[in-house]
Image (cartoon, rainbow, N blue to C red):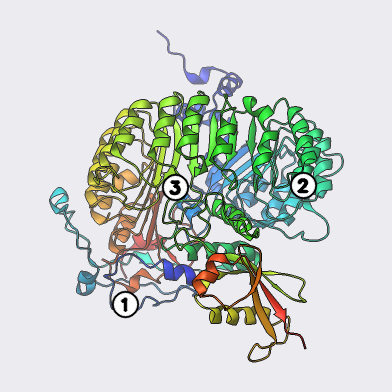
Amino acid sequence: MELQLALALPVHNSVKGFDLNDGGIESKEPVASRLWSYGGSLESKKCLKNKRSSEEAFGKMGGGVPQIFPLMVWSGQPNEEDDRKGQNRKTSSIVNKNEVEENHVVGWPPIKSWMKKQLHQQQQQQHHQAGRVKNDGVAERSGGRNSLYVKVKMEGVAIARKIDLRLFHSYQALTNTLISMFDKEQKFDKNGVNYTLTYQDKEGDWLLAGDVPWQTFIESVQRLGILRNGG
Amino acid sequence: MKMMMGSSFPEEVLEHVFSFIERDKDRNAISTVCQSWYEIERWSRRRVFVGNCYAVSPAILIKRFPDVRCLELKGKPHFADFNLVPEGWGAYVAPWIAAASSAYPWLEEIRLKRMVIPDDSLELISKSFKNFKVLVLSSCEGFSTEGLAAIAANCRNLRELDLRESEVEDLNQSSGHWLSHFPDNYTSLVSLNIACLNSDVSFTALERLVGRCPNLRTLRLNRAVPLDRLAILLRRAPQLVELGTGEASDLRPDVLSNLSGAFSRCKELKNLSGFWDVAPGYLTGVYPICPRLTSLNLSYAATIQSSDLIKLVSQCQNLQKLWVLDYIEDLGLEALAASCKDLRELRVFPSEPFGVEPNVLLTEQGLVSVSEGCPKLHSVLYFCRQMSNDALRTIARNRPNMTRFRLCIIEPRTPDYLTLESLDMGFGAIVEHCKDLRRLSLSGLLTDRVFEYIGTYGKKLEMLSVAFAGDSDLGLHHILSGCENLRKLEIRDCPFGDKALLANAAKLETMRSLWMSSCSVSFGACKLLGQKMPMLNVEVIDERGPPDSRPESCPVEKLYIYRTVSGPRLDMPGFVWTKDEDSALGLS
């Protein structure tokens, strides 16, 4: 929900001076009291859009909007459905969040989540194949919007994880995340000196991570490996 | 001269006559003739379609139509497909199922779209309706494979189980599988669509099920069913008419030849979909059946490029419907136009919707080619990155028989790439020439003028989708005052505000619904509308908190207005505001 709030902010930047978290969207208790509106004329100017080019076309509309409106009541109700659903829909909501992160405009272009997911999954798989670049040659170059998922395999751990390299801009950030990701599996030395980060490049060779600039690394990395330093 | 009164016919005769009248519009019309016709009609109505589940309540429905056998409900607004409707908004079907379980013991069919259906409801369905035959859940959510297991176990007469693009939680990770809950003596399956299931399917259960259901016509598998298994299934069900393959990446020669053989034995196969992870060579296995195909959905085939697509479609001379990714490119669409003269519907989806640069050679030209070469083309959904007024004019003149035209130019507010003008004239040509146009989606750079054209010419228009367009309220006013048959209007990110809405308030009662998000409609106007129009529910959806905490002139985030005979709904979440039921009682 928080993520959605951040992106659901309206385009109208003229809403100044108001605490947008007023009331809180997470509150789920029913509001027993009626909320009466007040004459908003003092503040209304701040919210008016500039364009009113059709004044002439419409003229007055029955004297404009009356001041007092005891008609709209905040009918917030406890949202049991949400809670239950939140538990059940782990996997699908995670995927949705990733999609939302990808683009700035929510819901544009208008493609169903289902389809986005299908394309995304297939494009990920294409990327994993060592040394293979997508047929149209545009792999990760297109925009900055595509994510760059690579597999991360830690020595001695049966299950590989996946990580979106687009989320990072430096080796440090990457290693920090990897440490917390695999923290449960192994005991990390404070300086991380027990482990070495390697990667497989486009040619299929395994190299030490950190030797080339981050941007170069990003363009050629196919998968990551974490090796235990011999003891 | 004596007038024959309707009531002088025996009821049974009238009922028999009415049984030939199926369309809702016609049934609604005959029910207005006189009281006795109304009564006979309502007792004999078997099929009900509720386009907005909040427009009427289960109680009202049951009261009027006591013996319904087929119920179809739609819930969330269309823009929910694109994540514009926050989670928890509503569209809960549970109260409907609960009411139907006691009122309609003979219910046979339930079709839901964009609704939330919990496992409990699925179980209730499976136990309440002895003759239950058809369950279609389109873009639904809230249920898991547990619910599906109940359906499988209890619905002895089930014919159709179609989960079209729904979100299903898989709870049968390890032991047991919901498919194996179909009893061994269950043989009536005609249609099964499980393409949306993410996890593995018990292949043994599936194979046995397919093998014992001789009437199976439609089988849409999910991605987890591999190619070599597909051949086995096809051999069990050579009578299939519609098939959705699973993933198709395994391209061992023996697998391919096995599959080709199986395909060629399916003499009735006309409709193909699926094709996830397709290894291009796999398509050669499909060539033998291409001439029979009338419908092909390649919109998930992210691995097939232009040349293979061209080879494929060139052999599908009887194709009527094609859904494909933009990998087909202009060249492929030219081939399509040359080979598929019976084409009725084309949808081209973007392979990289969020890329900034074009990744394929697909432009307006592809659509122009198809509009020229395919005389029966009437339904189009097209994603592209450039368009011109010229092209739109050409398309309009080529295809005056167009009924659905949805164009999505990926970058908002993109002008005509040749002249850098708005695309007003192009879309104007579409509405002017295509006199039977029922559905239209706009995109690109558009001023109020395009809405003037739409209001003037779009007399048959029923559904309009608008995004990032227009200059002022005049635009919205043109639509609402001009489009006589408008039922659904959905708008996002347009500078439309209070004036046009309030001036055309009465129009809203003639429509199913209006959606506006990121526009300029103020909370004050919403309140006024809610107050003045008792037959409308005006829902303000705003995740910033109570609108009362902001000035009335502040624009709302999202607005959903729909006509209803059952008043404000009682299941609204915290971020939805609407008029209070007792508002009529006045101020305190």
Left or right for B306, reference B195: left
Callout 3: helix, strand or loop?
loop
Taking the spot 30% from the left edge, 66% from the top edge, the residue there is A12
Q: Quadrant of residue B401?
A: top left
Taking the spot 29% from the left edge, 42% from the top edge, the residue there is B479
Q: Is residue A1 visible?
A: no
Closer to the camera in the image, B520 or B414: B414
Please name which of the two marks, 1 or 3, marks the residue nearer to the observer: 1
Callout 2: helix, strand or loop?
helix
At label 2, the amino acid type is Ala
Q: Mark 3 sits on what residue?
A: B565
Callout 1: helix, strand or loop?
loop
Q: Mark 1 sits on what residue?
A: A18
Q: Mark 2 sits on what residue?
A: B152
Q: Is residue B257 above or below residue A231?
A: above
Circles 1, 3 touching at the beta carbon (< 8 Å): no
State the image coordinates of residue B584 (x, y, percent, origin top left). Answer: 34, 59
At label 1, the amino acid type is Phe
